[in-house]
Structure formats: structure tokens, C-alpha cells
Image (cartoon, rainbow, N blue to C red):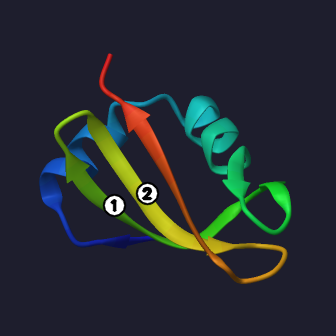
Amino acid sequence: MSVIDFEAARKWSKVPKDIQEMLLNNVFCSQCLETTIVDYTLHNDEYGVLLKGKCKKCGEDVARLVEDA
């Protein structure tokens, strides 16, 4: 994980570790369908934290929005 946005990192750190792991392992890829996100960065978004990275299986770009509670 790379931290580009400290506000996003603050929000992400509030998510319990077991839930973080579940979210990272449940990302949609247009090629592989369900996958794991790797080499991701955190971005602050008006709706929560946006994870941008690569599909673990095929290497395509993937993203996951984790909404604020």
C-alpha cells in the first residue's frame, strides 16, 4: 500500500483490520470478476476512501470504494 492522501489513510486506519482484509479480497475486476487488490493507493473521496490498484490475478487496474459509515 502507498499512502498519497493522509486523510484517506486516517479514515482507512479506523476500519478494523479483519474488515480491511475482507474488503481487499473482495474487489471487482472486469476480466476476473472477484479478485484481490494489490499495489494499491488510498485516496480521499467525498463518499469515503477510494482504493486504486491492480488485480492480483491479471494485473488490470481495479478500484474499490469504502464508504464512510
Identify the image quadrant of residue 46: top left
Within 10 angstroms of label 1, few (less than 14), some, or many (20 or more) residues?
Answer: many
Q: Which residue is mark 2?
A: 51
Location of residue 67 with respect to 25 vertically, above or below: above
- Amino acid residing under circle 1: Leu
- For label 2, the SS is strand
Q: Earlier in the sequence, mark 2 or mark 1?
A: 1
Q: Quadrant of residue 67?
A: top left
The percent coordinates of residue 65 (x first, y second) are: 43, 43
Q: Residue at x 36, y 51 (%)?
A: 50
Task: Label 1: state its secondary structure.
Answer: strand
Q: Residue furthest front?
A: 30
- In the rendered structure, the answer to whether residue 36 lies left or right of residue 40 reads right
Label 2 packing within 10 angstroms: few (<14), some (14-19), many (20+): many
Residue 16 lies, in percent from the top left, at 49, 28
Please, what is the three-letter code of the amino acid marked with disc 2? Leu
Instruction: In this rendered view, identify the residue nearer to me: 54 or 20.
Output: 54
Q: Residue at x 32, y 44 (%)?
A: 49
Q: Which residue is mark 1?
A: 42
Task: Say which residue appears at 30% left-offset and 25% top-offset.
Answer: 68
User: Taking 1 as reference, is 37 left or right?
Assistant: right
Q: Position of residue 32 (x, y in %)?
A: 85, 64
59 vs 57, left or right, is left
Is the residue under label 1 in contact with that under label 2 (CB below 8 Å)? Answer: yes
Rendered view: 16 above or below 39: above
Which numbered marker is on residue 1? none
Query: Which of 35 and 16 lies nearest the eye of the viewer?
Result: 35
Residue sitting at x 56%, y 40%: 20
